[in-house]
Image (cartoon, grey):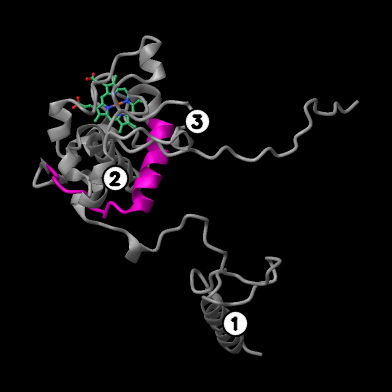
Amino acid sequence: MTVLQLKVTVTFALCVILLELAGCRQDMHNQPKFKPLRASEFFPDGRSARPLVPGTVDRSEVNEDPAYLTGLQNLQPVLTLPLPATRQVLERGRERFNIYCLPCHGELGDGNGMVAQRGYLHPPSFHDERLRRAPVGHFFDVITNGLGGMPDYAQQIPVDDRWKIIAYIRALQLSQHAAPADVPADIRGQLGQPMPPSQEGITGKTAPKGMAPPVPRELPPQTGVPEKPEVQR
Ligand code: HEC
């Protein structure tokens, strides 16, 4: 083999190796990933797609109305509830109110909750003229951002529940300021009549004259828990 032949052969071989090397460059062409709905042996259920995290919300279901999310419309507090005040809404509102607001504002919303009685700042009564006239957006703002001595509840109470609490506060306000004309005509005659004892609340309190009796609350059934838990030795 002449020197020239050798050079040609070596150059050719080098070219082949370089070409092959270039062909082997994968870089990001081959990524370790699963295409949608591909099977996987990695997870026990054989699916590469993982189940949705509980509480995942479909983006199309999100209410993006700024009035609903902020309680403001054109920088003014909204005047009407952005959800219908159905019985279900009011019941949820009452439950959330009793958890988050009652300790300071009291069961009636008169500002006489146990925390206030024990020395915390006294909240104003929801039955004050000013707060009876305050737009619902103002309540939303106070729950979301707090006000003075009132802590904010943005972290604890989701937007939807804030509105339900506000719907319930409106019901509380009505409960203390309803006129006889607000009572349906067919039962107006019962106003002022003594209430049957069975309709007293568990606190034994009777409703003031002319008011609907307090709703009796059901106590949870006894669950048969032993009085002294067994001690493991
Ligand atoms: C830790 C006690 C506390 C809790 C719990 C609490 N508040 Fe208050 N709230 C206050 C105090 C104190 C004020 C008076 C604030 C001030 O004027 O400095 C107040 C004021 C208010 C006001 C009146 C705002 C105004 O315009 O004067 C509203 C409305 C209100 N709270 C709603 C709520 C709601 C709804 C909840 C439950 C989600 C709640 N609060 C829970 C203590 C509390």
Q: Can you tell which of label 1 and label 3 is closer to the viewer?
A: 3
Q: Secondary structure at mark 3?
A: loop
Instruction: From the image, tell me which residue sits under label 2.
Output: 163
Q: Which mark is residue 202?
A: 3
Q: Are marks 2 and 1 in contact (CB under 8 Å)?
A: no
In the rendered image, the quadrant that contains the N terminus is bottom right
List x then y, in percent, for residue 43: 68, 65
Q: Magenta stretch containing residue 68, yes or no?
A: no
Q: Which of the 4 image quarters holds residue 188? A: top left
Answer yes or no: disc 2 within 8 Å of ligand 1: no
Left or right, 113 with reference to 203: left
Q: Is residue 156 visible?
A: no
Q: Magenta stretch containing residue 78, yes or no?
A: yes
Relative vertical location of residue 210 with respect to residue 160 in this rendering, above or below: above
Q: Which of the 4 image quarters holds residue 39? A: bottom right
Q: Amino acid at mark 2?
A: Trp
Instruction: From the image, tell me which residue sits under label 1.
Output: 10
List x then y, in percent, for residue 113: 37, 20
Residue at 51% of width from left, 77% of height from top? 22
Label 3 neighbour load within 10 Å: few <14, some 14-19, many 20+: few
Q: Which residues are magenta?
A: 77-100
Q: Can you tell which of label 2 and label 1 is closer to the viewer?
A: 2
Q: Amino acid at mark 3?
A: Ile
Alpha carbon distance from label 2 to label 1 = 81 Å
Q: Amino acid at mark 1?
A: Val
Q: Are marks 2 and 3 in contact (CB under 8 Å)?
A: no
Sequence-earlier tag: 2 or 3: 2
Foreground of the two, 165 or 38 = 165
Residue at 23% of width from left, 38% of height from top? 174
Left or right, 79 with reference to 69: left
Alpha carbon distance from label 1 to label 3 = 100 Å
Left or right, 1 with reference to 67: right
